[in-house]
Image (cartoon, grey):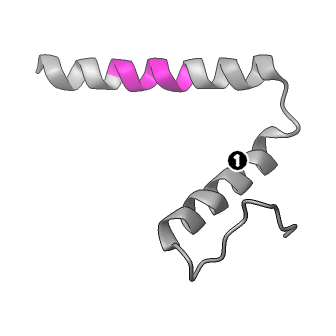
């Protein structure tokens, strides 16, 4: 993986390293998607989460 000015190593901070890995994975997943597709997917996930949450809180 390419090194950046603000790059850090796993031994320096394990939590930041995990965030770094997550961001890298998200970049790989989203680099081929359009902004519209990313937003549509996010809205669908949020709506599903909201319905699930409402169902849990009303019972």
Residue at horizontal 65%, vertical 25%? 41
- From this view, report whether residue 44 is shown above or below residue 30: above
Residue at horizontal 28%, vertical 24%? 53
Q: Position of residue 20 (x, y in %)?
A: 64, 59
Q: Position of residue 1 (x, y in %)?
A: 84, 70
Residue at horizontal 85%, vertical 24%? 34
- From this view, report whether residue 44 is shown above or below residue 6: above
Which residue is most to the left?
A: 59
- From this view, report whether residue 48 is shown above or below residue 30: above
Q: Which residues are magenta?
A: 44-51
Quarter holding residue 31: top right
Quarter holding residue 2: bottom right
Q: Position of residue 25 (x, y in %)?
A: 71, 55
Quarter holding residue 59: top left
Q: Is residue 57 left or right of residue 2?
A: left
- From this view, report whether residue 47 is shown above or below residue 27: above
Q: Is residue 39 left or right of residue 37?
A: left
How many badges with numbers are in the image?
1
Which residue is most to the front?
A: 5
Q: Is residue 46 left or right of residue 27?
A: left
Which residue is most to the bottom?
A: 11
Q: Which residue is mark 1?
A: 26
| Other-residue count near label 1 (Cα within 10 Å), few / some / many at <14 / 14–19 / ≥20 | few
Q: Position of residue 15 (x, y in %)?
A: 48, 66
Q: Is residue 19 magenta?
A: no
Q: Is residue 47 magenta?
A: yes
Q: Give the overall secondary structure of the magenta segment.
A: helix
Q: Disc 1 on helix, strand or loop?
A: helix
Residue at horizontal 80%, vertical 50%? 28
């Amino acid at each position: 993986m390419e090194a950046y000015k603000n790059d850090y190593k796993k031994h320096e901070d394990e939590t930041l390293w995990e965030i770094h890995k997550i961001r890298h994975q998200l970049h790989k997943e989203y680099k081929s998607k359009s902004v519209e597709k990313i937003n549509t997917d996010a809205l669908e996930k949020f709506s599903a989460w909201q319905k699930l949450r409402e169902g849990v809180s009303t019972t």
